[in-house]
Image: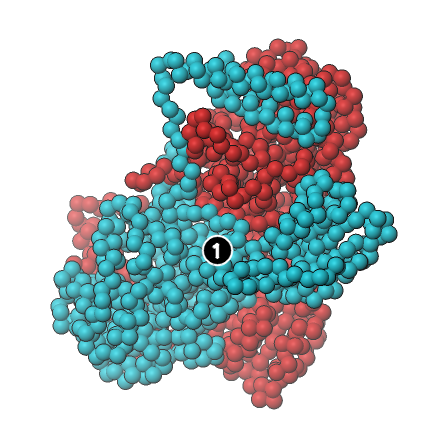
Chain colours: A cyan, B red
Amino acid sequence: MATTESLNQEIAQQNTLCNDLRQQNAEASLVEEAKKKLGELKKSLGALNKAAAGGKETKKKERLLLKTAKGTRDYGPGEMFCREHVERIVKDCFTKFGGACLDTPVFERKDVLTDKYGEDAKLIFDLMDQGGEQLALRYDHTVPLARYLAMTGATNTQSKLWQVGKVYRRDSPVMSKGRMREFSQADFDITGTWDAMIPDAEIISLVNTILSKLDVGEFTIKINHRQILDGLFEVCGVPKDKFRTISSAVDKLDKLPWLEVKKEMTEEKGLDPAVADKIGEYVKHKGGVELLDTLLSDQALMANPSAKAGLENMGLLFKLLKAYKALDRISFDMSLARGLDYYTGIIYEAIVEGSAPPGFKQANALASSSTDPAAVTAEPPKSRPAKKAKQGEDAEEEVDESQVGVGSIAGGGRYDNLVGMFTAAAAGEGKKTFGTPCVGVSIGLDRIFAIVWPKWVEKGMRSKATMVYVMSAGDGLLEERIELVHELREAGLNADFLAKNKPKLPAQFTAGEREEAPFAIILGGDELKEGLVTVKEQRWELKDGKKSKIESADKGVKVNRAELIQWIKSTATFAEWQSGKFV
Amino acid sequence: MATTESLNQEIAQQNTLCNDLRQQNAEASLVEEAKKKLGELKKSLGALNKAAAGGKETKKKERLLLKTAKGTRDYGPGEMFCREHVERIVKDCFTKFGGACLDTPVFERKDVLTDKYGEDAKLIFDLMDQGGEQLALRYDHTVPLARYLAMTGATNTQSKLWQVGKVYRRDSPVMSKGRMREFSQADFDITGTWDAMIPDAEIISLVNTILSKLDVGEFTIKINHRQILDGLFEVCGVPKDKFRTISSAVDKLDKLPWLEVKKEMTEEKGLDPAVADKIGEYVKHKGGVELLDTLLSDQALMANPSAKAGLENMGLLFKLLKAYKALDRISFDMSLARGLDYYTGIIYEAIVEGSAPPGFKQANALASSSTDPAAVTAEPPKSRPAKKAKQGEDAEEEVDESQVGVGSIAGGGRYDNLVGMFTAAAAGEGKKTFGTPCVGVSIGLDRIFAIVWPKWVEKGMRSKATMVYVMSAGDGLLEERIELVHELREAGLNADFLAKNKPKLPAQFTAGEREEAPFAIILGGDELKEGLVTVKEQRWELKDGKKSKIESADKGVKVNRAELIQWIKSTATFAEWQSGKFV
């Protein structure tokens, strides 16, 4: 028996048929027959619905919520044109620096991710156990890379690997700032044993190169060293088992004033207030080579082997960064600690002006000028601590966006033990296994997009790369248009046309202008017979914040149809596009 | 108190410290102190382990399974170099055809995917409900596209959209043939109302263009039309409510002999055997324009409005495909039905020689020469039917790979009602809503990779794009090497060097040769002072299936350091690379 569903489907099919028949100017009798059938089907549906309504179960079907999952979004054509542009620059730089691509699955066996992210483990997206393995979406690219290196250890002693793809966190999303549950990261890692600080300097030069090429505005790469931090904790008197937890308190100094951080250290984490104050003295420092010199003459620090090794590392790094001409972007920042536990050496984070959370600049200004860390109170940003507390529960409410900045746009560091953790866990206790020292960086593509995209909109950037739009002034000339479009495409030119049998010329111009195609080619029946086509070059300008075509009295030039492609390729516009200038 | 974990971490840190100190030639006393501490930590760990072993809980920690999830895999550098190459060609063609990129999230709200995939719904990967929405990984790009179009309907009346990304199916994986649980698809869709068959022909021309540019070998694009199929079902006497189920039986004709398909139709699906035989007569046909002419003169078919409309559509399509110069790849194949329910018009599938399952050619040869469909028995392939039956249960066992081909490498068709299904479901019953007719194609990137990759391996294709390798013949010259590498990269050249302080020259040559870098630049202290560097051009050849450097007595040329970049850019090798010939 017919159901509502099957009838609806039949009606849709019959509808399509009627339209097709009409469009093809089919015989009147066929059209009539098809229409009659459509009418009958609709009647049947009506009867069926009526019958159903008369029955007992009249409950309405629940309406579909037409939306993407929380914390995710679609990126439409204009946005993707910009995102692809950003991604291309990043990938080009990865290749330029000798990187090779690695691709890992979007989900991993759950135990691969277990015990890698500390408190943030609760943010992992688990897949439903459907009678197979326990799986979870990847949280970052670093852990899958380490798993890969542990699996291929014998053949992967030294390499430069990059990954670009999406990662997943069940965090509270702040869409407008580029903080999402699904977001894109571009990672570059140098693996294996090399001489001290050379790969580390490569990575920092890479970050500098990429961010310079992207339109993110002024940026700073903050650097610090875990051995320096550990050394100063030891010197200040922090018990060894509190290093990591105190470190993660220090890491909050870019978002919280010192007094709040001190409170966390002493009240939450039980640190002696005098010890906390000593730390406060150190972590307020930031600067360049001169800061390094100051610290190298700090006898207390230099007596500590860890701090000494870290500072010497840092000296080496500065020397190499000078050769890379990257020094002017660098800020040696003793308050940078990075959240993750697995870093063992150099750590870094790139921030841009626009990415600082509100109050950031003020707090930092105080931090670097005041000598009393207790004075660095500034105004405590209101929402962050409150939000933090709530995260443990459900994380379903949206965060007040005005209170949160884009955050750092790139970050990373050296992690020499992560691969070894995998090989050891796989080998079982007591077995001797290998490890692979690594240093790498993650670039936050969504955060960069959140900075770059508004500028693109402001500048009225094009959103498609169509170069040639083929039109007909005559009687449709559909096949002639298709033949030319096909030829142009075969010659490597982005070409399009209006998919209508006999479109009017103005409609075709409108379509070509919507794509900002620089070349309009007009076919005319008589001209074609003479072997000629008309080419009109079109240009656009930004006027009062609006993009519009520059009007011109130019009627176009007649070009020999057989020489058209050569003609286009010899124009200045084509050369411009070839060099990537059209973006 | 110290735990095994915290001690392990401390040991690892201390280890790093010791290595660093040694590497930096630190004072002996510092090294000694660090080593002593390391020894103490190890002792503590030993004691702790002993204590634990003496206690009650001596159960061994379970060993980690170091692998990727079932049906997924990593792609390493060589493979990704090939995959990126394939993807670049596909994306370039998408752009050339006027496409704009769309990106949707990797997971959707579960109800968006519900009721779209028929029997295959059981293959959907669900996410665990972690106190929020019910989510599932996307199964294809078509349904998310339709969801997107329904959401943005007002602004998306006519567009060409492409998507490249991974989709997920809990199917039985056959890794070696490119059938995975996570796999990459590249989709191109033309949406909105246009004149008949023009967008459909565009898509087929696109598939033809892409497959011609990829090294997949000879291929055929099979086409058919749902309205022709429906018409012939009606003419043969199939009850309307059996159209889709009989259609899906017909779709198996590329894998099963006619007798098996007939059995499914009659025994499983209750079709009158005489009706089945009539269908068998029709669906054995395949050919070009001449088949169309035969069918257009079939009075029974032409009296059916659906078949007539479909055949007239097909005539139009052939005319347009001629203008696209695509006819020689086309096979009008009446047995092509495609699995999914939502197609409403033209359908197509691209197959390559290598992608046919075993027995495919034989069965087809018989199908097109014999006049009695009952004769098309051939040898029934053994594993497919058995496997199908098992899929319903668990789908956990691997399939016998030798029995399955790569399958079609691209497929698609017209689906005019899918967007309307979303808008209707969102509006609730009885409300008037809009729909958007669409036609599109999905290209199976993994299947293409499964065909292309063995050819790359055979040809010894390079796997990295490093162009210049900078070495030092002198005393390390680390900073000089870095400065030059930095300059080369800034000039857009892919450059690298060995990350060692004082590497030996042969080690550097070996490293540069591993990357097949065509330019080796050697820095020497004295030469540098004169402003000169030595450049050696290197070439490789495939000899007896092995790639090796062409030995040459060439000692290299001395080039002015200041003119080096200009010099490289004027070489024939550089020009070759620019034109993409190095791949």
Give the camera-side residue of B364 and A376: A376
Judging by the rendered image, the residue that carries numbered circle 1 is A164
Is residue B68 visible in the rendered image? The answer is: no
Name the residue located 42 percent from the left edge and 75 percent from the top edge: A329
Q: For the residue carrying disc 1, how many other residues have a C-alpha within 10 Å: few (<14), some (14-19), or many (20+)?
A: many
- Answer above or below: position of A461 versus B53: below
- Answer above or below: position of A338 versus B331: below
Residue type beneath disc 1: Val
The x and y percentages for residue B200 are: 66, 37
Name the residue located 41 percent from the left edge and 33 percent from the top edge: A64
The x and y percentages for residue B203 are: 65, 41
Is residue B574 visible in the rendered image? The answer is: yes
Locate residue A138 relative to residue B348 in the image: left or right.
Answer: left
Name the residue located 53 percent from the left edge and 60 percent from the top edge: A546
Locate residue A149 relative to residue B537 in the image: left or right.
Answer: left
- Answer above or below: position of B70 versus B582: above
Name the residue located 63 percent from the left edge and 49 percent from the top edge: A511
- Answer above or below: position of A4 versus B4: above
Farthest residue, direction right: A530
The chain carrying label 1 is: A
Give the camera-side residue of B140 and B494: B140
Give the camera-side residue of B300 and A285: B300
Screen quadrant of the C terminus of chain B? bottom right
In the rendered picture of this protein, how many numbered marks are placed on residues?
Answer: 1
Screen quadrant of the N terminus of chain B? bottom left
Give the camera-side residue of B507 and B204: B204
Locate residue B326 relative to residue B401 in the image: left or right.
Answer: right
Q: Secondary structure at mark 1?
A: strand
The x and y percentages for residue B166 are: 50, 44
Locate residue B131 relative to residue B446 in the image: left or right.
Answer: left
The x and y percentages for residue A427 are: 36, 51
